[in-house]
């Protein structure tokens, strides 16, 4: 862990107004003393406004879990960067494995969304990660290369520096099977190597790369101890105030 850690939660399609406000009120209190790391929650669209409002002036940032790349137009059912900015959202999660595998998002679409987020001054977190079958067939590097190159396509060095990457091996998401700290560190190293080839060592070394996939209070310390792991993206365990607080306060 070399950089300022970014500890983030992805609520996915869970929570309602009441449970969300209870959760963020508790987190706000529990984490008020946290100064040496960043905290971020990715919240369902309908809960963004109340959560942003509740967390105003706190040390917890709020992000959306997706967005469309166009500013506005006849795109029924979509949410634009302007919608997010309008209610004070500053971060957006893009290319999550569920977006890729359940909703068929391609690297090309994700790249358009990254560019659009950056053009709007939203901070994107780009998710990458291999399927179990790809890992078993020795394709980790190939998959990470395709997804990283795809996501960062045509981004300048200055733009690339504004992106955060989350490595989430698909087989570890929601399965209780966490990548070992060594596996996570190794994958993050591969991503840095790809970034160094695309840009340079400065971009590669300074990129914040989060690990996600069954991060829990009892395994976060080992993961965060690794030199290439700069934070976590937590699903299930981010829905409970005490558990997520313990994750944020990893030792
Ligand atoms: P879990 O922590 O529930 O495995 O989910 C990980 C994830 O997908 C976070 O984006």
Image (tube, grey):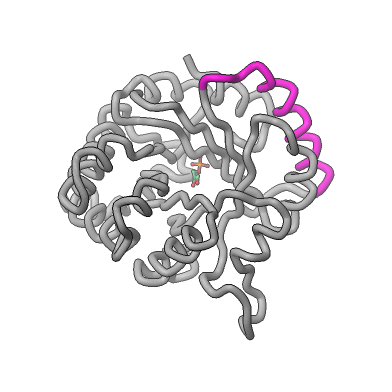
Residue depicted at x 43% and y 40%: 212
In the rendered view, would you say 54 is above or below 3? below
The magenta-colored residue range is 17-36
In the rendered view, would you say 59 is above or below 80? above
Left or right of 61, for residue 114: left
Locate residue 105: give its quadrant.
bottom left
Q: Quadrant of the N terminus?
A: top left
- Between 61 and 202, which is closer to the camera in this rendering? 202
Residue depicted at x 81% and y 48%: 17
Q: Does the magenta stretch include residue 32?
A: yes
In the rendered view, would you say 64 is above or below 24? below
- Between 199 and 112, which is closer to the camera in this rendering? 199
Q: Is residue 177 magenta?
A: no
**Farthest residue in the bottom direction?**
74
Residue 244 visible somewhere in the drawing: yes
Residue depicted at x 29% and y 65%: 154
- Between 83 and 142, which is closer to the camera in this rendering? 83
Left or right of 251, for residue 145: left
Residue depicted at x 67% and y 32%: 240
């Amino acid at each position: 862990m070399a950089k300022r850690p970014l500890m983030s939660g992805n609520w996915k399609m869970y929570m309602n107004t009441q449970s969300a406000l209870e959760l963020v009120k508790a987190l706000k209190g529990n984490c008020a003393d946290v100064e040496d790391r960043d905290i971020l929650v990715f919240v369902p669209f309908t809960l963004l406004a109340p959560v942003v409002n509740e967390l105003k002036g706190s040390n917890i940032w709020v992000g959306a879990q997706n967005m469309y790349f166009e500013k506005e137009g006849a795109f029924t059912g979509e949410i634009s960067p302007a919608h997010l900015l309008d209610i004070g959202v500053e971060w957006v999660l893009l290319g999550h494995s569920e977006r890729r595998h359940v909703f068929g998002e391609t690297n090309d679409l994700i790249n358009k969304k990254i560019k659009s987020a950056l053009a709007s001054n939203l901070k994107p977190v780009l998710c990458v990660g291999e399927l179990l079958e790809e890992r078993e067939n020795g394709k980790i590097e190939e998959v990470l290369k395709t997804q990283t190159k795809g996501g960062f396509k045509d981004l300048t060095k200055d733009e690339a520096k504004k992106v955060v990457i989350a490595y989430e091996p698909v087989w570890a998401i929601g399965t209780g099977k966490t990548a070992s700290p060594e596996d996570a560190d190794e994958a993050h190293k591969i991503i840095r190597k790809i970034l160094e080839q695309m840009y340079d060592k400065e971009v590669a070394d300074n990129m914040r790369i989060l690990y996600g996939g069954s991060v829990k209070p009892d395994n976060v310390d080992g993961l965060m101890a690794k030199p290439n792991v700069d934070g976590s993206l937590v699903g299930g365990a981010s829905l409970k105030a005490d558990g997520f607080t313990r994750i944020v306060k990893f030792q």
